[in-house]
Amino acid sequence: MSTGQLTGQTAAPRVPSPSSGAAARPGRRPLSLRRRRAGAFYVFVGPWVLGFLALTGYPLGYALWLSFTNSDGLSSHSRFVGLDNYREVFSDPDTMASLGRTALFTGITVPLSIVAGLLLAVLVNQPIRARGVFRTLLYLPAVVPPVGAALTFKLIFDRDSGSANGLLDLFHVDGVPWLVDPYARWVLIVLTMWGVGNVMIVSLAGLQDMPKELHEAARVDGASPWQSFTRITLPLLSPVIFFQVVTGIIGSLQSFAPLLIALNPTPAGVTSVPQSNYFYMIDVFAQFFANGRYGYASAMLWVLFLIIVAVTFLLFKVSKGAVFYSVEPEQAKTKSRTIGGA
């Protein structure tokens, strides 16, 4: 028997080492931690990206295209008209009047809501008995859906069977047509102030986040409650107030509640909205569904979007020096040094 045969019979089977296996299959390397994290990120963010593109990106792009056409939303044939729709927006006196009413409504309700919400937050932040009950009762109207709140106010201020005129009858006062001019504007303002609980709860969170040591030190130094409020509370609460101003203006410019409390809140009955409450978004609704001018209405929406962007940018510019943040962004003050350099 040869030596090669003896070696083949007695030699143990050769087990490949991990390094040799990796060398045999160079394409199957283990993923690094960074790549695994990136893969998990794209897996989790993918549904949101798809939803954003389908439900936000595509509608925005389609509305932008419609704003340059004379589309009526029904026929498939639409003509490109360029900037004609945008020129009409700024030259139409009715559209400009509706924008002016919206701006006036915003200028009234936003400051009132912020002041009222801050005062309520200060009151329910005091160490009083059953303050949790008061917080719940004041915040409860804010969780009522806008449609339900508007329909409730429509029933309350109905001229014939509303409880508001029923209360006036107890004092032998004639009923008031609340839902028509010139009273409809005040009903809408009251409806807006009724949901001031949102502003109150945000202001309350800001008040409870303040360090109590500052107020105690001011009290020891002899500061009055008013001085403590104006010199400590308001500056520390300025980021919260600024947030409420920005979001309040954006929400108020898009107000759609006047149509909900109208006598006939349908596309055909959009003309039943009182003139004082005929806001910009009501005009957009009328152009879309009552007049069938999809191109012009899309241009109106894009004009409103640009106005909101411009107002928000202006607010951020004006707020510099008036809003005091607890943590300022760090600024690099050190200079790079080289070996042997100063």
Image: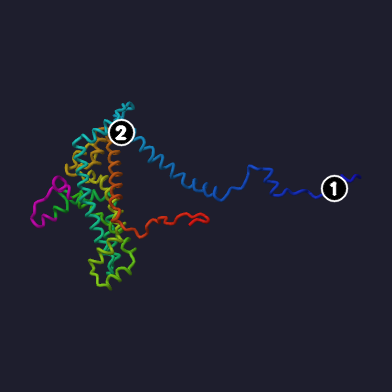
Q: Is residue 258 above or below residue 329?
A: above
Which residue is located at x 27 percent, y 34 percent? 86
Residue that mark 2 sits on: 67
Among the two numbered marks 1 and 2 on one chain, the one whose residue lies closer to the N terminus: 1
Q: How is the image coloured?
A: rainbow
Name the quadrant containing residue 76: top left
Residue 122 lies, with reference to residue 312, above or below; the image says below
- Magenta segment, prevailing SS (helix, strand or loop): loop
Q: Residue at x 24, y 70 (%)?
A: 223
Q: Secondary structure at mark 2?
A: loop
Give the extent of the magenta segment: 167-186
Q: Is residue 174 magenta?
A: yes
Rate crowding at label 2 as few (under 14), some (14 to 19) or many (20 or more) other CA atoms within 10 Å.
many
Residue at numbered disc 1: 9
Q: Is residue 206 visible?
A: yes
Task: Indicate yes or no whether the magenta region holds residue 213.
Answer: no
User: In x, y percent, where is residue 190?
Assistant: 20, 52
